[in-house]
Amino acid sequence: MAEGLRSKTGSDPLKDDDTLKDDRKLESFKLAVSSMLATAMKEQQTFIEEQFAKFEERLDNIKAEVTKNSVEIKKLKTDHKGLSTQLTKSEQALQTTCCKLEANIAELEDRSRRDNVRIINLPEKVENGDAADFVSSSLSKWFPTLAGGKMEVMWAHRIGPERNTGSRTLICKMLRYTDRDRILRAARGSRIEVSGREVRFAADYSNYTIKRRRSFSQAMETARKLGFTPFLIYPAKLKLSRGSEVHLFETHAEAEDFLGAQTRPAD
């Protein structure tokens, strides 16, 4: 009868049990694999999230550091600008102070030379070893208008070592400033020659003052061509006069600009 039953249903109960067991094992395996995959994915996601969080934290730290550095750099730039401005002001103040000191020193030196007269282009050795006596005895010959009163020369000497070309300037110190002034006034309207050479007379100033006065040379030459009478006022100012016109200039640039305008044709 059992054989009849198998023949009717076409199945084997033992085989069906094995199939069910295999299905259950497969299902269990699938569940186990799914669980393992889920756990692995969760762990991976957790790891990624942790790493991303760390990355964000590091990025925030970098941003904070960059911001801090930017602030510090900006502060350094501001400080540098302030220091540069302060340094520029200090340099300008120092330059102004140095110029004032130089001018004051020059003025003191000029005062110490106020009794001196420079005799320029005087032939060498005409003084025969006694420059003071030579100048003292020659003044009345050079300037007859000064013959009325004796002028005392304290000392006289040449400047610098003897040279092959040209004559060294001779400096003489008068006892009185008024005598120096009289000599210079007399020299302005006189032409003095010694051994065939024209001799000039000038006040004795410091190198600083001489340099400033010489800066007007070009302007004075131009002024004469335009009919002006130029005159240097101590320490270094140029006075120009022409008829009733009188002009005073503190710097050679001012004088040259003025004279340049005189030579340009009117628009």
Image (spheres, grey):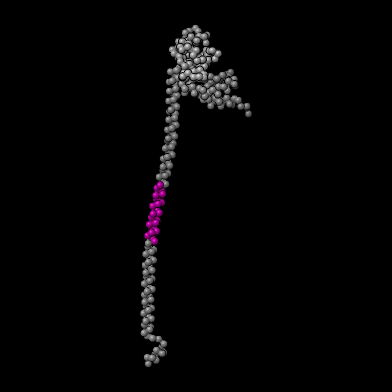
Which quadrant, please, contains the C terminus?
top right
Identity of the residue furthest to the front in this view: 164
* Residue 56 drawn in magenta: yes
Task: Find residue 13 and report its image quarter.
Answer: bottom left
Q: Position of residue 152 (x, y in %)?
A: 45, 10
Identity of the residue furthest to the bottom in this view: 1
Q: Which residues are magenta?
A: 48-69
Residue 21 visible (yes or no):
yes
The residue nearer to you, when weighing 68 against 111, is 111
* Residue 4 drawn in magenta: no
Say above or below: 202 vs 264: above
Say above or below: 191 vs 58: above
Task: Find residue 74 and report its image quarter.
Answer: top left
At horizontal 42% and vertical 30% (from top left) the residue drawn is 94
At horizontal 52% and vertical 24% (from top left) the residue drawn is 215
Task: Find residue 191 and report its image quarter.
Answer: top right
Q: Position of residue 73 (x, y in %)?
A: 42, 44
Is residue 176 toward the left or the right of residue 14 in the image? Answer: right
